[in-house]
């Protein structure tokens, strides 16, 4: 059987009705011309131990820029030694031997909508100490393709009735059930006639993110070696409440999770969820959440936790790289897409039950797309444990495959190997712009806006993060302006221009150059185009 998961309120699993409006469609990318340029700078960068490394970096073409024009511009920069298109090359692949891997189009390299995970595994298979917390309806910990992948609290002695590690949870050896307040995070079948639509949801999500891989059994998990922290908050019918979700997030942070996967959500804002999610992000945990399955614009109808600022929010695509008709959208909330239709994974199994007599099944929903991204994030964190939420978000958005996706569904469909390869070139400032009176309303570069007092902030490039002294900031109407020559130096990573003249319809450019503690400066490190609407 095939199921689809829809979010209404905080319900996880409701069959998608046929009357939903068709969402905007993705189209296959036809041009393979590089959209990024690799450069080598004249100055070396020096590691803390004094080692000199060649200063390579990546620059992404802005909207409307051509490859030849940008290369010609960069060749004039005296700080740049060489510059060339960042071509994609072939790579040896690792194909796992799981029995159903050919049915996983997100993994199968011969499928059109695969995420290049078999190539990514040649870079890393992750690490056993990288943990994804699955906050959901519970995970069947003894499932044949999940057994052995469950995170264990080694500071807790099994079933001795004592809170050995003093964290407030007794015998939480393998996670926690916040719904029933006990130490068994396995899902609980309903016996009172209530629908069991949500029973297998958490197990399915966990399998996509990190099922046993290359074990001649079942399916392949994206995170390969990644561990699963099982945290139950949802009932057998998929319903759950904010208090349990908030407690689960706090637990995941306290117990050292690297990534939090929330294939759940609902409409309506919550200061409680907002606060606890921000605490998780500030603690260095990367939070990934579903966009929801209501075919709605979540820039208008706020969907939480996905639309909480900073959360990596995932929409759904199908095996042909089309947008899923059920997927929510909204450029101010949704960051990128991932395969979410007809996704084969592990499900709750009971050999003595006629209702739960299969071990693997195909489900659809942004619930299924989210653990794809969470698994990729786990691989990134395995390579660079210190990556921040902003850095991961920047990498994923920048390296997503351009499949003709409308910005409302994110920047493209996630590409695992491109994300991993980008770790060595996280050197471009990631600029975000907001409405100054509503810091939760994000603007997109190159779009027209009527806000005369925008607010900008940005993420320090990883390449420079340890020895940066500040930024040269230019904001004005000269597209050819140089940030160092024409801008003003500041140490803060935010900028709010004076109130812009009304009704002028002009295009403004925010440009940044990075200055290091040794006095060296790197230009072309960030650009944001802000078009002020004109009055008619």
Image (cartoon, helix red, strand yellow):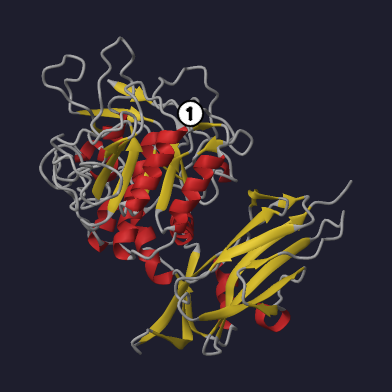
Q: 64 left or right of 201?
A: right
Q: Of all residues shown, which one is farthest toward the top? A: 193
Q: Is residue 202 left or right of residue 499?
A: left
Q: Is residue 171 left or right of residue 180?
A: left
Q: Residue at x 33, y 60 (%)?
A: 381
Front-most of residues 393 and 412? 393
Q: Quadrant of residue 466?
A: bottom left
Residue 292 position (above or below residue 289): above
Q: Which residue is mark 1?
A: 326
* Rendered location of residue 153, percent (x, y): 21, 49
| Residue 112 can be seen, yes or no | no
Instruction: Identify which residue is drawn at 44% across, 37% down.
Output: 316
Residue drawn at 59 percent across, 45 percent down: 331
Occupied quadrant, residue 354: top left
The number of numbered discs placed on residues in the rendered structure image is 1
Looking at the picture, how far across and down is residue 192, in whole percent? 29, 11
Q: Is residue 282 above or below residue 412?
A: below
- Across and down, in percent, residue 465 comes to 47, 74
- Percent across and percent down for residue 528 are 65, 63
Question: What kind of element bears circle 1?
Answer: loop
Q: Relative to 476, is 133 above or below?
A: above
Instruction: Count neighbours of disc 1 (C-alpha within 10 A) and say few if under 14, some if 14 to 19, many if 20 or more.
Output: many
- Is there any visible trace of residue 138 in the rendered image? yes
| Nearer the observer, 180 or 80 | 180
Quadrant holding the N terminus: top left
The residue that appears at 44% across and 30% down in the rendered structure is 241
Toward the viewer: 17 or 196?
196
Quadrant of residue 176 in the image? top left
């Amino acid at each position: 059987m095939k199921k689809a998961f829809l979010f209404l309120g905080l319900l996880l699993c409701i069959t998608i009705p046929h009357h939903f409006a068709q969402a905007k469609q993705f189209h296959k990318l036809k041009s393979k011309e590089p959209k990024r340029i690799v450069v080598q700078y004249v100055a070396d960068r020096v590691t803390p131990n004094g080692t000199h490394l060649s200063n390579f970096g990546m620059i992404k073409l802005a909207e409307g820029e051509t490859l030849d024009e940008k290369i010609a511009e960069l060749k004039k920069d005296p700080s740049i030694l060489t510059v060339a298109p960042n071509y994609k090359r072939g790579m040896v692949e690792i194909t796992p031997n799981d029995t159903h891997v050919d049915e996983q189009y997100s993994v199968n390299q011969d499928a059109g909508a695969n995420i290049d995970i078999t190539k990514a595994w040649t870079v890393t298979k992750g690490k056993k100490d990288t943990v994804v917390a699955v906050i959901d309806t519970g995970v069947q910990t003894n499932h044949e393709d999940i057994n052995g992948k469950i995170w264990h609290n080694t500071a807790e002695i099994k079933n001795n009735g004592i809170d050995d590690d003093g964290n407030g949870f007794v015998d939480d050896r393998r996670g926690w059930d916040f719904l029933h307040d006990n130490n068994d995070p396995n899902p609980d079948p309903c016996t009172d006639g209530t629908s069991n639509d949500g029973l297998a949801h958490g197990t399915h999500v966990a399998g996509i993110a990190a099922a046993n891989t290359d074990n001649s059994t079942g399916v392949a998990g994206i995170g390969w070696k990644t561990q699963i922290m099982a945290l139950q908050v949802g009932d057998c019918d998929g319903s759950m409440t904010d208090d349990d979700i908030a407690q689960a997030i706090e637990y995941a942070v306290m117990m050292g999770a690297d990534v939090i996967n929330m294939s759940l959500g609902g409409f309506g804002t919550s200061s409680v969820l907002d606060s606890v999610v921000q605490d998780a992000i500030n603690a260095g945990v990367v939070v990934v959440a579903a966009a929801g399955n209501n075919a709605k614009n979540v820039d208008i109808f706020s969907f939480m936790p996905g639309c909480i600022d900073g959360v990596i929010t995932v929409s759904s695509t199908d095996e042909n790289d089309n947008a899923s008709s059920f997927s929510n959208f909204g450029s101010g909330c949704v960051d990128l897409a991932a395969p979410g239709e007809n996704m084969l994974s592990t499900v709750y199994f009971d050999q003595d039950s006629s209702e739960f007599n299969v071990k693997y099944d195909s489900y659809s929903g942004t619930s299924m797309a989210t653990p794809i991204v969470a698994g990729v994030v786990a691989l990134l964190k395995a390579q660079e444990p210190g990556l921040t939420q902003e850095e991961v978000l920047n990498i994923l958005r920048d390296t997503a495959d351009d499949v003709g996706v409308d910005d409302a569904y994110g920047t493209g469909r996630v590409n695992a190997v491109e994300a991993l390869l980008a770790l060595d070139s996280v050197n471009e400032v990631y600029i975000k712009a907001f409405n100054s009176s509503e810091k939760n309303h994000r603007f997109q570069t190159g779009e027209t806006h009527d806000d005369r007092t925008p607010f900008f902030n940005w993420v320090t490039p990883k390449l420079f993060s340890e020895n940066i002294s500040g930024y040269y900031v230019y904001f004005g109407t000269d597209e050819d302006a140089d940030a160092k020559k024409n801008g003003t130096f500041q140490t803060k990573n935010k900028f709010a221009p004076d109130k812009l003249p009304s009704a002028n319809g002009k295009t403004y450019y925010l440009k940044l150059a990075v200055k290091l503690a040794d006095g060296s400066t790197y230009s072309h490190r960030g650009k944001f185009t802000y078009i002020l609407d004109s009055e008619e």
